[in-house]
Amino acid sequence: MLDTRQLRYFVQIVESGSLSKASRELLIAQPALSQQIAKLEDEVGKPLLHRSSKGVTPTENGLALYHHARFMLRQLDQALSIARSDTGAVQGMVSVGLPATTVSALGLHLVRKIRQRYPSILLNVVEGMSGHISHLMRLGQLDLAVLFSTDMSNELTVEPLLIEELFVLIPKHSKLFAADRDSITIAEAAELPLILPTGSHGLRQRIAAEFENRGLGTNVVAEIDSLSLLMNCVYDDIGATIKPMGAVMHEGARGRDWRCLPISDARFRRRNFLYSLGPERLSTAAAVVAGVVKETAFELVENHEWSGFEDYEVLKTVEATSVMI
Amino acid sequence: MLDTRQLRYFVQIVESGSLSKASRELLIAQPALSQQIAKLEDEVGKPLLHRSSKGVTPTENGLALYHHARFMLRQLDQALSIARSDTGAVQGMVSVGLPATTVSALGLHLVRKIRQRYPSILLNVVEGMSGHISHLMRLGQLDLAVLFSTDMSNELTVEPLLIEELFVLIPKHSKLFAADRDSITIAEAAELPLILPTGSHGLRQRIAAEFENRGLGTNVVAEIDSLSLLMNCVYDDIGATIKPMGAVMHEGARGRDWRCLPISDARFRRRNFLYSLGPERLSTAAAVVAGVVKETAFELVENHEWSGFEDYEVLKTVEATSVMI
DNA sequence: GACGGGCTATAAGGTGGACTTATGGCTAGA
DNA sequence: TCTAGCCATAAGTCCACCTTATAGCCCGTC
């Protein structure tokens, strides 16, 4: 377990460029520094410094640790001053876990709003696959998370956020599907080469299950867990994918055009839920951020700039072709 | 100085809701925890826990520290794994200091590019007034910074980035200046009520100096160091301000319209420079980010979506009315 | 009301980690 | 060759963090 003292010493050594100089600046004997650095290197398992008669320079591993250590020491100062402040202001660190498509759909608007309304809130957005986000939420490492099911711990609060529809996504220039079609059947989708998340992921499993239920196979040509890499591969026409609109919302700005084909006979939909820590552990700042998340989601639904986002309440009247995933 | 062990104990206590339960989970005697928490409270100077016979709950200050501590403990794990990794990949933490208007002009594009091209780079964007950014750069707490002058330490590398023009900014609905005018003279600007940064800031001083050189006073009605607050006040028609285009670049998305009046007889321009740590301390990741910063700036200049950004090289042929601030 | 169990705080003692001084080996420059 | 600067290792000291012991408060059950 890294220790702040070790990090402080290490940063000073890298900046002084020498153990003896650092020892003078820290007012500590040089052999103590030598021992502490040796101990740190043992703990990391790699050499962190090149030693010479002219002093020390960091190795690549040492340099990586140096930059990280510097950031963290700054965070420690911030933590102290925030913990010391008079309460009442809406401030502090709030950690929000968002799946990648949700980051694309909501992230930028959320960050803007928090920044402009609550400049004292330090917003930490953690992006990951939903399995990973739910793991972090369970570990108590997040204040808020957007997830797709309601099977989580009783200690967390959960409320519905929105419903998103899934589309078959291919690049505009794709040869995989007739250019004049603006929707696709589920049987046609099953015939396409598909790029999906790996088999352990919820979305993948439920799509596969729906295909099976209709006697269709899945023609998965690649399994990729990184949204940006997955979208890059799809754009190379390696295969199609099935994702909510969030996956392409900022692709236009990158000069990439997409076709988003609704599945006409089986409209795949996915519920989004907002999880938060229970009230006794939820900070004022996190409660505020939760409100802004909900507001941002509401605006996404209401302004209709992008299709495929629906209010959670509206879908109480269920379409015959709707498939909840 | 906060210590990681203290933070680890504190987080576990808050999550267990009791010192005795936390001591069992950490495999440490309860009195040791009691002493460490008392010590932490001494250091912070505020109570962090409410004690009762049923256990403990965090105070507001305790809750703020809890969330911050959790984030930092996660960062420690990340630091360890990054320091342990085999080198060669472009990864690690990179800290970039950007003034507020530069964040507006470049920040979102920069973050997008880094995220998509180098997902292993953890980009830490530090926003502040340029005085503060240059202070952090001098302290060695940043890898890169965008600043407006070249009078910094010899140990840093500096290169020109772009030139931005300053405009008198008022809301579209403003009564401060005739609605049919699309430029303003410097004498007219001096007559306006102005909201500027405080007197110690470079921009403020240079604007005041240019006014004085022409026998004009400055009619400053407010001094505000926060760009968002300053822009809010300007939008309330309290006064005008003088800023680069970056100050309004994302205001349209908030439903706020602005008039950006070039000063016709004294075109205020400001050079932007990119500072970086010297080569022996610049990580591969930071060098990569520097390249992306330059690329993003270049695109801003080239695509002409916003006026007032010029390539550094082009302005070697100097306009008669140009005033370098 | 008595008892037991749970809670946190304080005191006192022990020990190992973090410091110190001492020393040695290596390199570079005059 | 000598001097100065560098980092590493050894041995000794001391103090911070742990331990056990104890006390006080509370709540629930009988």
Image: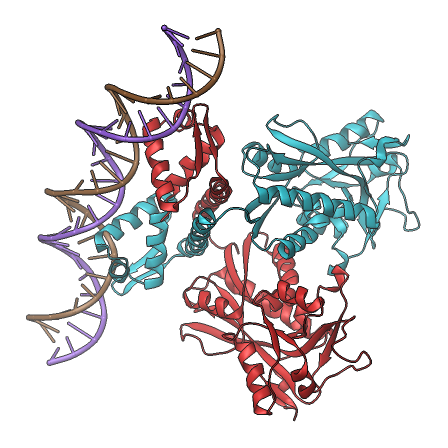
Chain colours: A red, B cyan, C brown, D purple
In the picture, measured across the screen, residue A292 lies left or right of residue A260, that is left
Observer-nearest of A190 and B30:
A190
Vertical arrangement, residue A41 with respect to residue A176, above or below: above
Percent x, y of residue A169: 70, 74
Residue at x 37%, y 58% (from the top left corner):
B58
Q: Residue at x 77, y 67 (%)?
A: A257
Nearer to us in this view, D22 or D26 = D22
Residue pushed farthest right?
A: B180
Report the quarter where the C terminus of chain A lies.
bottom right
Q: State whether residue A203 appears in this view.
A: yes
Left or right relative to C17: residue A168: right
Residue A2 locus on image (x, y percent): 38, 46
Question: Is residue A309 in sight in this rendering?
Answer: no
Q: Is residue B298 above or below residue A278?
A: above
The residue at the point 63 percent across, 71 percent down is A297
**Above/below status of D22 relative to B319:** below
Find residue D7 and report its horizontal and vertical position in percent: 38, 28
- Farthest residue toward the bottom? A320
Location of residue B43 (image quadrant): top left
Location of residue B21 in the rendering, given as x and y in whole percent from the top left corner: 26, 62
Q: How many marks?
A: 0
A303 vs B226, nearest the viewer = A303
Viewer-proximal residue among D8 and B140: D8
